[in-house]
Amino acid sequence: MRRHNHVEPRCPKNHELIVQMLSDRAPCREIAESVGVNVQAVQRYIRKNKLGKGLMNNRDIARVNSDEIWRLYRSGMHQTVIAKQLGTNRASVNELICGKL
């Protein structure tokens, strides 16, 4: 039996909410809070039901928000805070700033 298996049954009950939040580009962290499960349970549910097809990944989000990332970075905001605010990860923000993205 998997760890945290007790939280996955909540995901099917909230399938429509998860699909809607994914289409609104909500990060898994936000979806997990809304559904009342941990992030890993949401990620497993998305993979298992192939809900992530066609969605933007972290690098895509960083590219789309590049102007905003640069504005926030130049204002002195830390990369981790920028990433959380824009729904991506710090590595993608860093890659954009360092010119690797």
Image (spheres, helix red, strand yellow):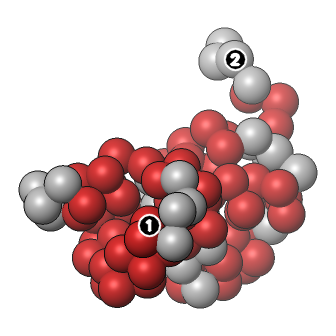
- On the question of residue 51 being in view, the answer is no
Q: State which mark lies toward you, 1 or 2.
A: 1
Depth check: 98 or 84 in front?
98
Left or right, residue 25 beside residue 67:
right
Where on the picture, by quarter, is residue 34?
Answer: bottom right
Task: Give residue 68's position: percent from left, percent from top.
Answer: 43, 83
Q: Mark 1 points at which residue?
A: 73
In the picture of the structure, the residue carrying the numbered disc 2 is: 3
Mark 1, secondary structure of its residue: helix
Q: Can residue 101 be seen in this view?
A: yes
Q: Residue at x 51, y 72 (%)?
A: 75
Image quarter of the N terminus = top right
At x 74%, y 28%, the residue is 5
Which amino acid, by three-letter code, is at mark 1?
Tyr
User: Is 48 left or right of 63, judged from the image as shown?
Assistant: right
Label 2 crowding class (10 Å Cα cut-off): few <14, some 14-19, many 20+? few
How far is the residue under mark 1 from the one under mark 2? 38 Å
Amino acid type at circle 2 is: Arg
Q: Quadrant of the C terminus?
A: bottom left
Query: First in sequence: mark 1 or mark 2?
Result: 2
**Residue 48 x/y as whole percent:** 48, 49
* Up-down relation of residue 27 to residue 9 (above or below): below
Q: At 66% across and 83% down in the image, what residue appears? A: 20
User: Residue 6: where, in percent of width, then height?
Assistant: 83, 30
